Amino acid sequence: MEPGRTLLARLTLLILVSSSYGGHLKSGPTLKMDQALLTLHNQLSEEVQVFYTSDYCYKCVYQQLVTVKPNNNNASVVVSTKFTLTLQVELQSRNPTVCRWSQTYGEGGHYSVWIQMSEAAGKASCTDAVDKKPNNAHLPLVVAALLLAIIALLFVVAPYVYRRRCTSKLIKTMCCQGPQYSVDNGRAQACEAEHDATKAKPARLLSLDTFRGFALTAMVFVNYGGGGYWFFQHAPWNGLTVADLVMPWFVFVIGTSVVLAFRSMQRRGVSRLQLLRKISWRTVVLLLLGFCFLNYSPRDGPLSWSWLRVPGVLQRLGFTYFVLSLLQTFWGQKEIPLRANPWWSPVQDVVLYWPQWLIIILLETLWLCITLLMPVPNCPTGYLGAGGIGDHGLYPNCTGGAAAYIDSWMFGDNMYRYPTCKEMYRTTQPFDPEGVLGTINSIVMGFLGMQAGKIIMFYKGTNIRILCRFLVWAVILGISAAILSKCTRDGGFIPVNKNLWSLSYVACMGCFSFLLLGGMYFVIDIKGWWGGQPFIYPGMNSIFVYVGHSLLAFYFPFSWEMRFQESHWEWLFQSLWATALWVLIAYLLYRKKFFLKI
């Protein structure tokens, strides 16, 4: 290196050090999304250490944030704004706690904390100040919600205006000009035909397609980043976010579709052997899609067994579909007699299918016994925590308990390497959210969807009974989830946990699923107030949209290298843009009557 450039580098380094540790910081580093700048001013004569922990991290060990030198020195650090942070200041020499506070910092904000001696109390204390007001991180979300609401309103108003125009043309033709002299006769007949077509009830259950498409659209949105907002990403461990809702909804719809589709095929005379062939073929295709194609990423290079992931989303969906289809093939052909019965008529849709219920109860008992009773080396029996620095750091290598132990025994290192708890809980063990034990409860979730399908099919024509039974199931499952979780995030018997697909999580998602499907059934299929657009289009081409958005996630025009990373604006636009493109593609395929089926 040249002497002049060496001197310049030393001067630059000196300026950076002095700006960080001496005097007030005039300008901080460029902050990105979910970041704030915290400057700590130490006016004591002793060096202090600052520790932190996130309130979302359950019983986590405090982590060192920064050390601040004494005598009017300061240090600046970048902190996360996703969750509430608890910070603690300790003296270097004696380790007594000077102060402790909890605060949710705002994105892009600059904050100062002054550590000084309090003359009144005669001991050290901390005072805080806001040097620069934070940005409104939710403004992009509000703007996007308003724009989407306006677009939705236009799509609602436009057909209404078009129908009014068609009606006026028809009346004018019939009353004034007569059909034989009207130049608009063809258009009037077309409008009348379209009106009659809209009045005719479709054979498909549109609410089910809409529910599937709604879940899939939300899944695409969160898979493309969800605008970078933490509540559109999976929860670190326990608890629920928007991203944790979509997959169980999809599994629920699979169960409902299995009942309706298989009953239709059975009534057409499809034999049991033909059903088994169809089930096996579809399961194999789903497994191959998940195992081969969706393991690939342009960033990873050629497929390699050293990092190939055995479990996966499509693998779980395929196996769940296989088990549910077997249940329906062998024990799902009974008709519910709609007649009065002295004692079991209120639960006849359950009693008549007792073999299915027996198998599901045995599967859930197996999940409970393995999860809560199976001994795991160097871990407490029945451990459901994230490990790492959680639970006071006592079980750092016990992430997921028995679920992770079984997966590691079966798959070795061929599992998901970046679990949602890795960043917050500082975990080092791999954990796969689509593992073996979770698949058992995925089957239970799909079976709840099968129950919804039975209710819709056997109580067809009595919509009040369908809606009432949906509501009863939602209440039962909601109360069960509340009891198991004690209405808390971390303190229940079995916390709500998407990574483990815990029993309380399945009960909670089953409650939401019955409510959502029931609401859509009332609005779409009973009242006809909504046709399910635009969600019905991806709902009728779900395999194509899911596989396509996974394979093309890193290609333009679905994604690009973002230039403005200091806010959520570009990331939210990219997520919404990519999601809208797939909805548009699904709509075009719908118009062309192209539906990818397996």
Image (cartoon, grey):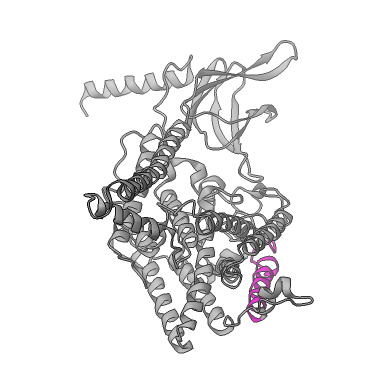
Q: How many marks?
A: 0
State whether residue 336 appears in this view.
Answer: yes
- Could you tell me residue 566's position as x and y percent? 39, 31
Magenta span: predominant SS is helix
Q: Looking at the picture, tell me which residue is in the foreground, 571 or 342.
A: 342
Residue found 63% across the figure and 60% down from its top: 467
Residue 299 can be seen in this image: no
- Name the outermost residue toward the top: 119
Q: Determine whether, in the image, residue 432 is placed left or right of residue 589.
A: right
Q: Decide whether residue 365 is among the magenta residues.
A: yes
Tell me the quarter of the picture where residue 60 sits: top right
Along the viewing direction, whichever of 411 and 465 lies nearer the viewer? 465
The image shows residue 266 at horizontal and vertical percentages of 49, 83
Instruction: Give the left or right position of residue 455, taking residue 169 as reference.
Output: right
Q: Is residue 403 left or right of residue 533?
A: right
- Residue 23 in the figure: left or right of residue 534: right
Instruction: Give the residue drawn at x 35%, y 42%.
Output: 574
When asked about the image quadrant of residue 571, the answer is top left
Residue 437: image location, x then y, percent: 58, 68
> Which image quarter is the N terminus in?
top left
Residue placed at 52% from the left, 66% from the top?
A: 435
| In the depicted structure, whether residue 335 falls above or below residue 166 | below
| Residue 67 in magenta stretch | no
Vertical relation: 478 (above or below) 452? above
First to last magenta residue range: 355-382
